[in-house]
Amino acid sequence: MSQQMTLSVQKREGLGKGANRKLRTAKKVPGIFYNSEGKNIPVAIDGTQLEKLYETAGKTTVFNLDIEGETAPCLIWQIERHPYKPFFTHVDLFGVDMEKPIKARIPLKITGVAKGTKIGGRMEVYRDFVDVFTKPGSMPKVIDINVSNMEMGDAVHVADLKLEDGHCIYDSNYVIVRVSAPRGGKGEEGEDA
């Protein structure tokens, strides 16, 4: 990570529904910063800055949080949107220790066209994310799964995913994506599948 992004926030005094409503009217987003020592700090964030940061960083990129001059590495942990208006209503920020691994949910991206689908197979995607345990600085933004070499009947399991630093968390070695034979159709040689 060459250039780390920074988000400037202010501590907020007023808590509760009324104070949060006033913040949102002023185009600010109420939030809570949970620092790495376990302290919770209520903050107010400029809505436009938060939207720009979320577009580029998402939930998997570490950025610097500047709270009135104090800086800490941070991740967006949870974010709430208005049900029908295009703005955020609340955000939870999670302070991280760059040397300690954390659990995070990383999205999966399927790339390529499987060989098995070209001869009539069906691509079945069972998961669109995976939980990983890794250091915040080496957390991937997305995990790419190239399915170009998958034949009919092939599958990618969670244990098949390799991370540069860290590992996937799973109880069972579940399937992420599979190329299945078509149901009730004809096979390659014209036989029933």
Image (cartoon, grey):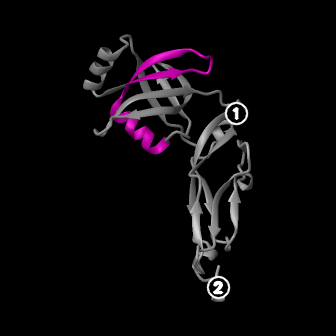
Percent position of residue 186, x then y: 60, 83
In the image, 123: left or right of 53? right
In the figure, residue 160 lies in which quadrant?
A: bottom right
Depth-wise, is mark 2 or mark 1 nearer the camera?
2
Q: Name the foreground residue: 139 vs 174.
A: 174
Magenta residue span: 30-57
Residue at point 74% right, 52% down? 159
Q: Is residue 147 visible?
A: no
Residue named by callout 1:
101
Report x, y in % for residue 59: 52, 39
How many numbered discs?
2
Q: Is 36 within the magenta? A: yes
Q: Residues within 10 Å of mark 2 (few under 14, many from 20)?
A: few
Q: Looking at the image, which is closer to me, 69 or 124?
A: 124
Quadrant assignment for the C terminus: bottom right
- Residue 157, percent from left and from top: 70, 56
**Left or right: 19 with respect to 144?**
left
Q: Which one is earlier in the sequence, the residue at label 2 or at label 1? A: 1
Residue 191 rendering spot, x and y as whole percentages: 65, 86
Q: Judge the density around disc 1: few (<14), some (14-19), many (≥20) Cα neighbours within 10 Å.
A: some
> For the N terminus, which image quadrant?
top right
Q: Which residue is at the far top?
A: 13
Looking at numbered disc 2 in the image, what kind of residue is underneath it? Glu
Mark 2 residue element: loop
149 lies above or below 176? below
Query: Of all residues shown, which one is farthest toward the left?
Result: 25
Q: Which residue is mark 2?
A: 188
Residue at 61% in and 72% down:
114
Q: Residue at x 34, y 32 (%)?
A: 47
Q: Is residue 122 visible?
A: yes
User: Eyeballing the image, is 186 above or below 125?
Assistant: below
| Residue sitting at x 48%, y 27% | 92
